[in-house]
Amino acid sequence: MPQDPIRRSQRLNQITHTPHEHLDKAVKANAPFETLASYTRFLTAQYLFQQELKALYTDPQLIELIADLPERCRAEQAKADLNDLQTAIPEPVAGAVDKPSPAEALGWLFVSEGSKLGAAFLIKRACALNLSENFGARHLGEPAGGRAEGWKRFISILDDLPFSEEQEDEIDKGAVAAFERFNVLLNHAYTSAPQAELA
């Protein structure tokens, strides 16, 4: 029997396996849930990433494909978390994604949306720091309708879009770039912290 062709989302998972692993190691190395100061740095990186993707979540062309895209953005929740923890809103970091093609933008959104599944574990760790989806860890909270359901809807649309070979390359490029960018922002958030604060 011929094998079913691999789904686009499955291919994206495969090609981002290595950058995903690198990012996981970088997150663990910074131990974001050991202290509130360290978590605040992690939150700063999350805010910067979501803020950079805000233009994609509000892009009319992409909203035509995914109607609930604006509600999926977590930039405002991350900003509210920073306010909860009385942390200054960080300045943008050079190198943000800028006017990608729709296919490349969907690669970035694939990574952002996929991270909501992992956030189910992270919010449990955040609870140990007295944080919750109502205070300090809103951006890790469960989306309306549930994590799994929201992801299934997103993937269902993504997998069924008619793409050219060039667009397939663009979505792959966007997904890999998203992991690499978050790594840059994570590194920035931790290295720009005063050492005394992280001690």
Image (cartoon, rainbow, N blue to C red):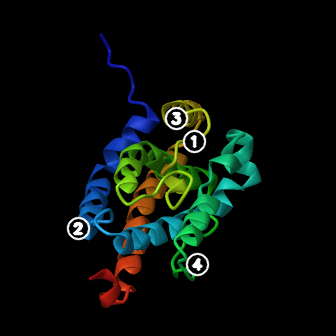
Quadrant (top left/top right/bottom left/bottom right) for the N terminus: top left
Of mark 2 and mark 1, the one earlier in the sequence is 2
Q: Are marks 3 and 1 in contact (CB under 8 Å)?
A: no
Q: How far separated are the C-alphas under marks 2 and 3?
A: 30 Å
What element does badge 4 sit on? loop
Q: Residues within 10 Å of mark 2 (few under 14, many from 20)?
A: few
Of mark 2 and mark 4, the one earlier in the sequence is 2
Checking the image for residue 155, the label placed there is 3
Of mark 3 and mark 1, the one earlier in the sequence is 1
* Residue 101 in view: yes
Relative to 48, say whether 152 is above or below: above
User: What residue appears at the point 37 percent right and 47 percent down from the top-left corner?
Assistant: 124
What element does badge 3 sit on? helix
What element does badge 2 sit on? helix
Q: Amino acid at mark 3?
A: Ile
Q: How far separated are the C-alphas under marks 2 and 4?
A: 24 Å
What element does badge 1 sit on? loop
Q: How far separated are the C-alphas under marks 4 and 1?
A: 23 Å
* Residue 100 in view: no
Q: Quadrant of residue 154?
A: top right
Checking the image for residue 143, the label placed there is 1
Q: Amino acid at mark 1?
A: Pro
Q: Which one is in front in this view, the residue at disc 3 or the one at disc 1?
A: 1
Q: Amino acid at mark 4?
A: Ile
Q: How far separated are the C-alphas under marks 2 and 1?
A: 28 Å
Q: Is residue 62 left or right of residue 106?
A: right
Q: Residues within 10 Å of mark 1 (few under 14, many from 20)?
A: some
Q: Which one is in front in this view, the residue at disc 2 or the one at disc 3?
A: 2
